Image (cartoon, rainbow, N blue to C red):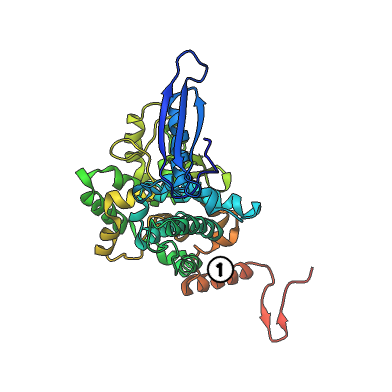
Amino acid sequence: MTTAQDIPLGVSVKTDVEYRAGRPKPYKARARWIDPTTGDRRSKSESFATPEEAQDWIDGIVRAANGGIDPAAATQRLAEYGDDVMPLAIRGLERKTLDPYLAGWRLRVVPSLGHIPVRMITNGVVDRAVHAWIADECSRSTVKNSIAILVRVLEQALRDGVVQHNVARVTGWQREYERAEDELDDPRSLALPDWEALTRLADALVAQSHGRFTGWGHVVTFAACTAARIGEVSGVRAADIDRRTWTWTVRRQTTPGPGGLIDKGTKGKRARKVPIIEEVREMVTERLDSASGPDGRLFTGPRGGRISTAVLRDATHWDQVVTALGYEHLRRHDLRHTGLTWMADAGVPVHVLRKIAGHGSLMTTQRYLHPDQSSIEDAGTALSAHLGRAPGAGWSPNGPQLRAV
């Protein structure tokens, strides 16, 4: 889109589009204004192939005359306003900073807030968006870059008089991020205690959802029993389930993207196999039998749409339900912590648990182990029993006495 650079700011512009038949570009867009210094009448025009292109040119002229923004910017949605002012918002940024800022805008800010009118964005709205990014396991730098570009766009809105103050200058998010990281040092503390607690949660979420949609209970139960992320549950296709071995090959996850939810590879780009326990096989069988072919999704929303952690939260009134059940701390991602904790307590070897979880580091998996006092004592007993079976093993004040070879 071409915009005039020589139109004085604040002048009143009159525009029109003339159709001239028989020409390759028959739509002539024209703008007229009075030069505020000389009083002379001035004009600018350009020809286009379509009326839409001509109107875009006129819109650019009007924005230039109004200081670069649409006079209706007060009612513009954030995504549209951001597109208009982005050249101003990113001025002065180096390339190495610009790329992650624009990625944060495209992948997180616009999907989370882009549909909201600029003047309706509040501190609370921004807080919720940032909390959702943290809950979706975005890295600290990713969250920082996403907030930074939002601050720059809303700073321009402040200069333009669209808003009274910059609500994106949020504080405390780093402390929340640190709290989330601290919790991961002891992920066992985030897990549900037992199967009864899980079924009670699933039933309560269904009861609070619109139309009492049973699918929400299935999503929650399946996520906990497979130690999976909600986005990964949304990505399950019928072909990913092997009924012969009752294993699920985790290949994809649903995440926010430009224009809405999209499917992409799993975190770390690694496929992994997860066991499907007997308690959920009947439910999985029913869903496999009703799936629309090998590529059919096993879990969808009530209207057949993709699921995300935010969708599950809003559709089931998650925060109110978990508070009523006494699990105020519980987030959707804690269903994954629940499954991994249960598997660790069941005696799944740590190297196997790591493969099921898809962890890159063994140290991450080891956080789910629980070396309580009784298990420590059992380890000592086991070692004594092992040494006792060794021929000639024993102890004396002079040290261990082993049979000479």
The local crowd at label 1, few if under 14, some if 14 to 19, many if 20 or more residues have their Cα within 10 Å, is few
- Which amino acid type is marked by label 1? Ala
Q: Where in the figure is residue 356, as x and y percent of width and height? A: 51, 49
**Quick one: 18 or 200, which is closer to the camera?**
18
Question: Which quadrant is home to the C terminus?
Answer: bottom right
Question: Could one spot residue 22 in this view of the protein?
Answer: yes
Question: Could one spot residue 275 in this view of the protein?
Answer: no
**232 in relation to 51, above or below:** below
Residue at 51% across, 26% down: 47
Residue at 57% across, 44% down: 270
Tell whether 270 sits left or right of 257. Answer: right
The quadrant where residue 201 appears: bottom left
Q: Where in the figure is residue 216, as x and y percent of width and height? A: 30, 46
**Quick one: 358 or 378, which is closer to the camera?**
358
Q: Where in the figure is residue 311, as x and y percent of width and height? A: 34, 47
**225 in relation to 321, above or below:** above
Residue reaching furthest top? 22
Q: Which residue is mark 1?
A: 382
**274 in relation to 157, above or below:** above
The quadrant where residue 290 appears: top left
Give SS at disc 1.
helix
**Quick one: 278 or 270, which is closer to the camera?**
270
**Quick one: 153 or 36, which is closer to the camera?**
36
Residue at 71% across, 82% down: 399
Q: Where in the figure is residue 210, as x and y percent of width and height? A: 22, 46
